[in-house]
Amino acid sequence: MAELQAFIFDLDGVITDTAEYHFLAWKQLGEELGIKIDREFNERLKGVSRLESLNRILALNNRETNFSLEEKEFLATKKNEHYKELIQQVTPNDLLPGIHSLLANIKSNHYKIGLASASKNAPAVIEKLQIGNFFDTIVDAATVKRSKPDPEVFLKAAEQMNVTAEACIGIEDAEAGIESIKAAGMFAVAVGTNEALRKKADMTVERTNQLKLNELIKSFQMYNDRLAKLK
């Protein structure tokens, strides 16, 4: 049976919620392109790469083939520059409920902590939140070739912490993220009320303040006990 050694967190929607800043930045770019983006559509952009998000936005007006890759990269960079301006507002008060105490509890119990984020700005956000001291590694979109739901970002975090995938708990709030965790061979914890999340994850909580270390460990052990019986 795998012994728990590490926790790997997504950033947006789990540690903090910068989704609003992403939405505002994409919304501004969309307006410049004559494409209207609403909050409901923005849910489809969670957990996916910047270029894939842009393609989904362009597809709203059947314009995804109207731009070259170079032009798309320019537009994605333009969005990111506005996003970086917006996240200057982030402070430790923007940590989601219960997260600081959870990170402190994990650390005091000598487990390793990694970050696996689809955002290239993850290190800057972690710095603004003043929680960098908790993390043994930070892996973001700038350091991987394939975005979620590919497992690369979670596998790289585990590798950098020198632990096996089976010894990790991955925590996410997006379907693409949960798929990434499971593809990596890790125990997947979902945060949210989406029914699809419940079906794909091994454990689900509705809110971050329901993430309790003892419960996470217990669920991980029960999961591995079931796997052992099946072998």
Image: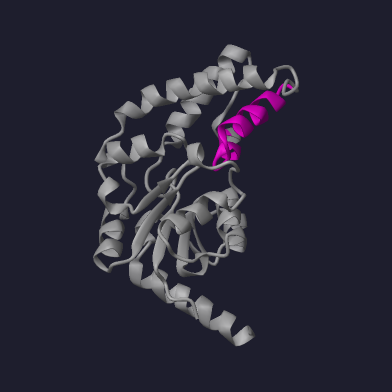
Give coordinates of residue 94: x percent, y percent. Answer: 31, 40
Residue drawn where x is 52% and y is 83% of the image: 225
Of all residues, the one furthest to the bottom in this rendering is 229
Residue 37 relative to residue 125: left or right: right
Residue 6 higher or lower than 11, as above or below: below
Question: Is the stretch drawn in magenta largely helix, strand or loop?
Answer: helix
Give coordinates of residue 218: x percent, y percent. Answer: 41, 76
Residue 89 relative to residue 225: left or right: left
| Image quarter of residue 160 | bottom left
User: What residue range appears in magenta?
Assistant: 42-61
Asked if residue 197 is among those painted magenta in the image, a careful observer would answer: no
Residue drawn where x is 33% and y is 41% of the image: 126
Give coordinates of residue 214: x percent, y percent. Answer: 34, 72
Residue 55 higher or lower than 127, as above or below: above
Which corner quadrant holds the C terminus? bottom right
Q: In the depicted view, which residue is nearer to us: 164 or 108? A: 164
Q: In the depicted view, which residue is nearer to us: 191 or 132? A: 132
Residue drawn where x is 62% and y is 27% of the image: 54
Q: In the depicted view, which residue is nearer to us: 192 or 190? A: 190
**Residue 156 in sight in this render:** yes
